[in-house]
Image (cartoon, rainbow, N blue to C red):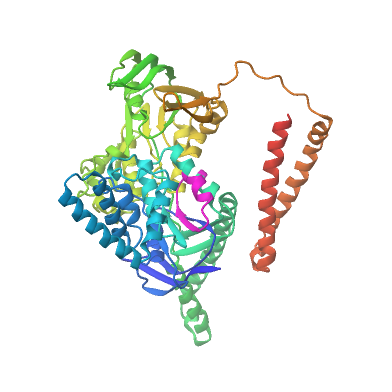
Amino acid sequence: MPLLTLDNACLSYGHVALLDKAKLTIDSGERIALIGRNGEGKSTLMKVLLGEAMLDDGSIWRAPGLKVSYLMQEVPNDEQRSVFEVVASGIENVGQLITDYHNTVHALSEVVDEKESTRLVNQLNEYQNQLERLDGWSLEQRVEAMVSKLSLPEDALVSSLSGGYKRRVMLARALVCEPDILLLDEPTNHLDIESILWLENFLQNYKGTILFVSHDRAFIKKLATRIIELDRGNITSWEFGYEQYLVKKEEFLAIEAEHNAKFDKRLAQEEQWIRKGIKARRTRNEGRVRALKAMRNEYAKRRKQQGKAKLNLDTADSSGRIVAEVRKASFSYGDKPIIKEFSTKILRGDKIGIIGANGSGKSTLIKLLLGEIKPTTGKVKLGTHLEVAYFDQNRADFDMNASVMANLNHGRDRVMVNGKDRHVIGYLQDFLFPPARVQSPVKTLSGGERNRLLLARLFIKPANLLVLDEPTNDLDVETLELLEELLLNYEGTLILVSHDRQFLDNIVTSTIVMEGNGQVNEYVGGYDDYLRQRAEPVKEVSVKKDTSTNKATTAKKEPPNEKPAAKKRTYKDQRELDLLPEKIEKLETEQQELVNLTSKPDFYQQDKHIANQTMARLTEIEEELNKAFQRWEELE
């Protein structure tokens, strides 16, 4: 059932049309990923859907009584209210009353003075009467339930929480009004992997409609049931998941390029004809002249796809073979252990990933590896001829009122890149900054543009040891993939802190994991390889109360010292194993036939029901193949 419809929506800022007769329908129960390049207007589109931005032309229809809620991209760092107050503020009109009642109850439980107690009781009665008139008790219970469901400390100040818990608080605030459509703008930004996995699981079980913007490809693959793309003012809907979208988008761009090439060739021929002189202007050829004018107008209106960034690293002379050697290094802040007896050896050309929960000590480990701090015990020995370049967007010392050009190279108009002298404007165009944009103040840039500027500034410096702390935040997928390619071909040593699982899988050769309580371990490969190699966590099997001491004690299941003997396959299992290759081959053949069918230009011109059945069958085949391969692995 449609909840919201955009029809011929137009919205421009300056000369750029962010929406150009765009159309969109959102149905109930969908999980829609909104993707597009930085600066295309994704956040603006969300504000239009929310009702905070008005269209220049076109219309937007909302179902009667539709409730839309929004989780903004940035979480507040200076929020001095309690968790309960912030969550309750998500309910219009009654939220403040619920907060006042909640705070008065707490104050009454702690007051000693009888006069003050009487005043609070009277105030509480007034709040109770108001809540009864406004059906506030059910709403108050809803706030309590949401705080409990998301495991939030209701009386803690939001400013005192970690980034992951701040994001949970803002999510609870968005959900407490029970919205029909939940809008999420970059919900995984600044979250650690554990928090992202929690968010994925929560949203997969959420019953409402979700529209989200994200650059995290693993997150999109996990959640999206439909992809909508904002590209050059148009919204294109792809009625399937992310991986199929990538294939179809490539085909679509190829067809578009072919069409444009044919059109441009014909236009050139007509321009050549018009220049032949008087014959072209005779009365009998006026129709052809009018057609040429129409072609010129069409060409002028064509918006070319935004180009790709051109990223090039300036590599310094090679470092020594050993970049850093760590021997049983420990580090503590007071009595709190951050790193316990960690040992590793980083060699020239290694690409090391570092993952761990927020606050687990990733930045401390980097400082140890770079020699910025000394270990409490143990040794850290650095290699020779190290030239370090450090990317950390949280420490970017941008002058927000100065221009892009001034922030890049202290206002100088020439830069030296890979031994070549270049003009700043030309260099910034490699990072998708048009000439008109280089004089704009940094405070006007989007998050993705600031990240690209930081990368541009970083890559000027020759380096043989590159340290990147969360470089993927706010980057669009195309720039992210180019950064991957650049780092894969980088001949120096890389230390990468990231929560982007696919980014880690595609780049790093080993992963250092902050396991908690000072435990730091290193695993070969990326994030998925770490999941396969890590030890299974000890599971709690029961919690019982010791009546003699009145304390809760936890019984833990200890891992066995010896592995159980492998079981022999039954005849039935062996028979199933023998038949699996044939089953998989048939599924893959059918999958290829359907993919070829959907690749035909007229596929989407046929009956929509048939097309939907075909796409549904493709999804079923993918699930069946995954189960078959998983079963094969189990039986093997």
Q: Is residue 351 left or right of residue 577?
A: left
Q: Which one is nearer the viewer's eye here, 356 or 437?
A: 356
* Residue for point 58% across, 49% down: 243
Residue 207 sits inside the magenta stretch: yes
Q: Quadrant of the C terminus?
A: top right
Q: Which residues are magenta?
A: 199-218
Q: Decide which of 579, 558 is in the foreground and name it.
A: 558
Task: Pinpoint residue 458: horizontal percent, then vertical percent.
Answer: 32, 36
Along the line of sight, which residue is nearer the eye, 591 or 435? 591
Can residue 154 be seen here? yes
Residue 298 lies, with reference to residue 448, above or below; the image says: below
Would you say 471 lies left or right of 207 here?
left
Query: Does 426 appear above or below 296?
Result: above
* Quarter of the rendering containing residue 157: top left
Q: Does residue 314 appear in the picture of this structure?
A: no
264 lies left or right of 370: right
Please count the marks in the image.
0
